[in-house]
Amino acid sequence: MSATAADPDGRGWTMRWVTYLSPSGGERRPGVVDDGCVFGCPGGEDVPGLLAGGADALAAAHRRALEAPVEIIVEFETRLCAPLVPDRPVVLHRAGREPVAVPPGLVRGTDDGVVLPAGERELVAEVGAVAFRYGTGQVAGYTPACLWTAGEGEPVALTLGPALVTAEEADGAALAVSVSVDDLPAAQGVLGDGPWRAPGAGTEPVGSLPARTGPVAAGAEFFVEAGPLGSFELRVGTDTGT
């Protein structure tokens, strides 16, 4: 359930935050997804800034977006960016492989697609979720994540999105992810609580990627289903999602 009139403060109900390109000016703007629409959030803060302010600040911004949105756009017509781009590397824990730290410059949104490096004809995808935290260190929410690698496992891009879903939606649940390529099952996995529950965790973003595909060729239709965290589809080897 989204935060609506039943819970105007947005506390205790799930919030879904996105970053999108505004159709009026083209700037990146934070927004709230509710009832099939994106409500542009007033004010100058981005999603990382709202998280830094803590749970109360995020809930207050959510309320402002629903009560006095800058604009309202039908969700499927919205050009989405990554929900947020962190200011530090994202540490990704991978099934059967060593963790890898992916720099912010490789983060992409689900509408950005994924481009193959020169000379590459296929990529491998490792899929799961990344947890982001408030400035206090408490888990704020999760977003689906896909690490794209080429050659000997060199990271090419990290797709995040479509939305950052606050922790109420997922806490206590075993989060499952599944991947299909050209409508055929390609990988699946269960995150459980993930490495973000490790003792002594700081405020850095941490991901768990339990599902790994084989090589995915350029031109393939790639679909991720992450249950309560949402789903996305893109065509491999292009600079736009489908």
Image: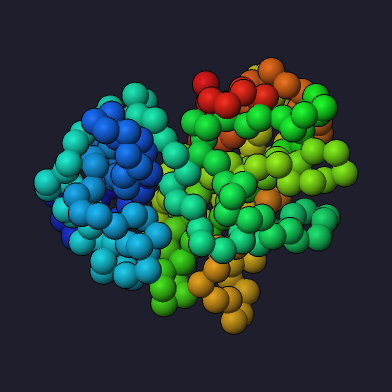
The image position of residue 163, as x and y in percent, is: 43, 44
Q: Give the answer, above or below, for where 46 lies relative to 35.
A: below
Q: Is residue 158 visible?
A: yes
Q: Position of residue 204 (x, y in %)?
A: 55, 68
User: Closest to the observer: 65 or 211?
Assistant: 65
Q: Who's the residue at 25% across and 61% down the image?
A: 59
Classify residue 59 as left or right of residue 236: left
Q: Residue 49 location, x and y as percent?
A: 35, 62
Left or right, 61 with respect to 108, comes to left
Residue 147 at what x, y percent from top left? 67, 45
Residue at image x 85%, y 39%? 151
Instruction: Identify the residue at horizontal 23%, vertical 40% (top origin).
Output: 39
State whether residue 1 appears in this view: no
Coloured how?
rainbow
Q: Quadrant of residue 141?
A: bottom left
Identify the residue at the far bottom of this view.
200
Q: Residue at x 82, y 56 (%)?
A: 97
